[in-house]
Image (spheres, coloured by chain):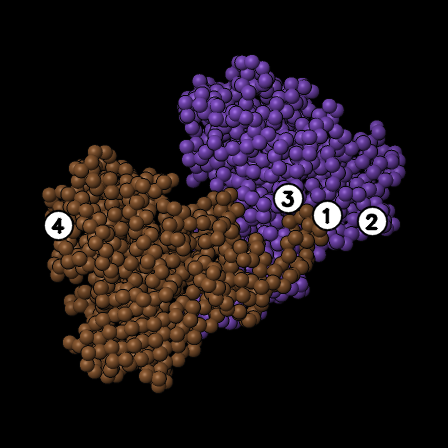
Chain colours: A purple, B brown
Amino acid sequence: MANLSISRPFPLKNVRITDDFWSAYIRLVRNVVVPYQWEALNDRIEGAEPSHAMKNFKISAGLEQGEFYGMVFQDSDVAKWLEAVSYLLETGQDPELERLADEVITIIAKAQHKDGYLNTYFTLKEPNGRWTNLAECHELYCAGHLIEAAVAYYKATGKRTILDVACRLADCVNEVFGPGEGQIHGYDGHQEIELALVKLYQTTNNDNYLRLSLYFLDERGKEPSFFEQELHRRNGQVHFPDLDMVHDRTYNQAHLPVRLQQTAEGHAVRVVYMCSGMADVAAETGDQELLEACRRLWTNIVSKRMYITGAIGSMAQGESFTLDYDLPNDTAYAETCASIGLIFFAQRMLQMEAKSEYADIMEQALYNTVISGMSQDGKRFFYVNPLEVWPDAILKNHHMSHVKPVRQGWFGCACCPPNIARLLASLGQYIYTSQGNTVYTNLYIGSQITLDIEGQQVSIDQHSEFPWNGNVRFIIQVTEKTTFTLALRIPKWCTETKLTVQGIPVQLDEQVRDGYVYITREWQSNDSVELNLHMQVSRMKGHPHVRETIGKVALQCGPLVYCLEETDNGAGLHQIVLEPQDEHRKQFDHELLGGIQTISVPAKRIRSDDWEQKWGEHLYIANASHEWETINATFIPYYAWANRGQGEMSVWVKEK
Amino acid sequence: MANLSISRPFPLKNVRITDDFWSAYIRLVRNVVVPYQWEALNDRIEGAEPSHAMKNFKISAGLEQGEFYGMVFQDSDVAKWLEAVSYLLETGQDPELERLADEVITIIAKAQHKDGYLNTYFTLKEPNGRWTNLAECHELYCAGHLIEAAVAYYKATGKRTILDVACRLADCVNEVFGPGEGQIHGYDGHQEIELALVKLYQTTNNDNYLRLSLYFLDERGKEPSFFEQELHRRNGQVHFPDLDMVHDRTYNQAHLPVRLQQTAEGHAVRVVYMCSGMADVAAETGDQELLEACRRLWTNIVSKRMYITGAIGSMAQGESFTLDYDLPNDTAYAETCASIGLIFFAQRMLQMEAKSEYADIMEQALYNTVISGMSQDGKRFFYVNPLEVWPDAILKNHHMSHVKPVRQGWFGCACCPPNIARLLASLGQYIYTSQGNTVYTNLYIGSQITLDIEGQQVSIDQHSEFPWNGNVRFIIQVTEKTTFTLALRIPKWCTETKLTVQGIPVQLDEQVRDGYVYITREWQSNDSVELNLHMQVSRMKGHPHVRETIGKVALQCGPLVYCLEETDNGAGLHQIVLEPQDEHRKQFDHELLGGIQTISVPAKRIRSDDWEQKWGEHLYIANASHEWETINATFIPYYAWANRGQGEMSVWVKEK
């Protein structure tokens, strides 16, 4: 099979982010998140549950004495940290950080066994248990994260130590798993190695890794169940007795071969990591059946199982998808990592098919759920990103006990914070992709890229006022006049677009294909493109099958979804009803929450203070009439919620 | 302390129910439920989990070999069955049933230890564990149910065997528990014995039982925690490891002394059983502080924590109350037993305070949640009575996994079916109470009572068309002209009442006190009273603090709350919006569900079938307009739902 014609992101080192909005986040990752996480990995955060992740590696490396502590997948936290560090190093020199990373790499390398095996849990705790509990113990998942980190570090620094470690580990895995006799015919409970192996293949050109990735994908869901067979082989021993990772086949997407799956089932992060791997393999091999399965799962997720914030996973049990159109706002799981995984999946689909719908969802998840996942000081995180919160009920009603009304310091299962860090540190990879002579602009993030088109060096300067304003300007620099195509995404949220090239208006209708406008010309230095994506406030309505959004609207302006908070609107947000299509007053407040736009909307509110006086101490009254008061409802961007203490929040608001 | 001036129910044998609606239920209890339960208790129901309850008694009595099986409170199922049988015998002879009951009593008596102790779980399984795990093991709870059954059987038949068993058991408990040295200073995890001991006191006049009841009430919530102390004494051994019955003090209302409790917290059934016991003791002793606590908890429940169906318990975890105004419709627990307990509580409050609000709630719980708990063939039961059901989501979303979309055959924890049986079999106790020369009519249920007023025999014939029509007629028979007061409840749902005595209209305003109209006169035989309680269809609205009812209405007509079912209205009930205060067409359908009134209301429905065609495969659309279709929404009484297969159901419906 030949690989598909795909557009690729640019090497991170060729992308410099100069964006007002995002530069602050990336600085936060560099100056706060990554250093904070380093402290966490070394158990130096007061009050937080110790991570022990670095200690596990040191003990495995023979550098310290002690026992393994932490989750079975604790290793992956170090790998994700190292991956984030790699992206930071690729986009900006930092000898001190690089020295630290080298030290970590030395330790990791020492913890590797002679045969390439590398996993501190099994090394320290179950030395005879290697590869006996794939369903639960995340061995290949941890390997995948190590491989991703290794590829990133190699790309950033050119140093091979950790890449060699990763290759030896992948070779070890390749020997143990496969269709051959004496090999384990299995796959991991938590998908991750599939996409990592494709990265390693792309970096090393070693076909084995691509083949192994495909093998893992196609083993999943075969009958008889591999997880049940290995459970039998280990005499029924389970690692997480409270969960049922072995028999609940949808939990880890082992209910059907991946090519036959019609709907996104089970653990949401696993689904999107799996889909990312499927898309990677499809792109590299041209496997149309796999691509078709990707398209099908993508469509199922985004058209039936995704929150308006780009969040996925409707329930806490199994951190899972549930069924089409089941999107409860208050009991949502909506894990930060799942939206990050959705971005991974979107980016890969986008590389194969230049359709704006993929980038739209990438943007939706990024500007809403992903950055909602982190506090504005970079020190506190949401694992769960609900769309409606009543803090008193969270405390008392178990249905919401997985929801936190404010961001938490560090988690025992600390997957989300380092995932946010690695995504933001590598954000430059998501802005552009290129294929042949076409450069696709997928995200409007102020940045400078340099690229090579038919031997000519081209640089594109993007100036963006996103997410507050849809004015975007591109300035092109070329060494010589060069013909190429600049493709610009027209977001679905935008209904009024203006485009000029060198000041001359471009008629959009003819030039737009699949949500991108294509501008082909012979470019000269200082050529400019001005794009105005008008950011009106839209009242978003949900599909009538969604029970939790019917009769309600969500406000969206540009890529940002907005919400009501108690601190601006008082308690009892459910009593607020918007007048249909009333005026929306936008105001930018530089002082508020790091500088945000608020939207003020005239609304009515059902009064509750006079109920007892009017009706007595009764819960239910026949033909009761409500008293209404006129108010201004103040909306803030969803990502900024819960940064001013604990209170109610709601994305969906009733409309008359 | 002197006892309060209280009104008493009549002995069941003096009440004969002749009601169209309720006679059918009572016949069902006699002919189906009680025989079916007897089969269940003897493990003869095919496909149902074996109960083993009778076997446990037989083995304990030395009549059979074997081991204990079942829940730790399995004994109580037999006791509740026996209690129901007693009520049936008191209201109608049945020598065969009485013979069966006598056999059961013989077995129970043989299972009793010499010292009066009686509990098959501890006898068979933990003979050295008596009274070591009150928090979890329901020992006193089972004793309480046995006492209730014994009192009922003695009243019905005059036979003392089981009453003597109960007294010996109560004497045993009275020796073991109390403030004295060497006694256990404790109380049961699940309240029940408190109210049972008052019944035993009322039957035997033995003060010890009343004192012990008060003792148990006042021990609860003392510091240090008795449950923690006994946990420590048994070295941390727990019976239900998945629950935390010891440390979660609100679960069993041990968070505060009962006199200080302000809100209904924890396990809903326990709360109302406790309150019933508190009210009993208050009535017998005149303890005003206890009465005040009852009033406070009553008000908290009915004005802040009760569903419109008279159901209580907002969450499955701990089968518990949560917080004020938290009344989710789809994840409700709303256990049948809890509404039965609320009726117990209401009846006791009513006896102390002749206020219609108590009888109103009694009626609300009875006509809605209690009979919703049983299928129309008497063979299937709801434990949980939700107010909104989406069956597909129940299967897939764990938040609803405690909800069943159709009634189930028999439960491993079979508390609800026998509780329904004993309530319906004793329904005659809830219709009237009397105090001095006043006879209170609390429920409008066709019946004949005979009573003695100042030496004169009086009989009252009530003819009622409830719940379909508010016409009620009373015919009085007296041996001689007798002066007494007939007090008739004016339900809160009724806004138009007509009353005639001997055909002469009575002006109500002057005669109504606390929701009862008092008619005092010298009655002659064949005197008639005609009461017309107009049953209009009311649109009920919830308190604006209730998030799940805001913007919605529930239809109520007379005591019945109505609901929409998928079978009448198609799937997607959330898409239906009622026009405000439109016409309600009532129709009685003799063929439907045993004969019910339906209510048809013109409404609009958001169309969902054209969404994809109009907006494409998208979940969220900016400024989307919905297409509406005009429909007739058909409501059926809530109690009758889920008798025509599985489908959506909703009590609360949007209103424009």
Q: Nearer the viewer, residue B549 or A367?
A: B549
Question: Residue tagged by mark 2?
Answer: A508
Question: Residue tagged by mark 1?
Answer: A491
The secondary structure type at the circle numbered 4 is helix
Q: Nearer the viewer, mark 2 or mark 4?
A: 4
Q: Are marks 2 and 1 on the same chain?
A: yes
Q: Position of residue A286 (x, y in %)?
A: 72, 27
Q: Nearer the viewer, mark 3 or mark 4?
A: 4
Q: Nearer the viewer, residue B518 or B54?
A: B54
Rounded to the nearest angstrom, the CA distance separating label 3 from label 1 is: 15 Å
Tag 3–tag 4 contact (CB < 8 Å): no
Q: Position of residue B401 (x, y in %)?
A: 45, 45
Tag 1–tag 4 contact (CB < 8 Å): no
Question: Residue tagged by mark 3?
Answer: A302
Viewed as shown, does residue A310 lie left or right of B458?
right
- Amino acid type at image mark 2: Leu
| Mark 1 closeness class: few <14, some 14–19, many ≥20 residues within 10 Å | many
When the figure is inspected, residue A616 is found, relative to residue B644, above or below; the finding is: below
Rounded to the nearest angstrom, the CA distance separating label 2 from label 1 is: 13 Å
The tag earlier along the polypeptide, 3 or 2, is 3
| Mark 2 closeness class: few <14, some 14–19, many ≥20 residues within 10 Å | some
| Mark 3 closeness class: few <14, some 14–19, many ≥20 residues within 10 Å | many
The secondary structure type at the circle numbered 3 is helix
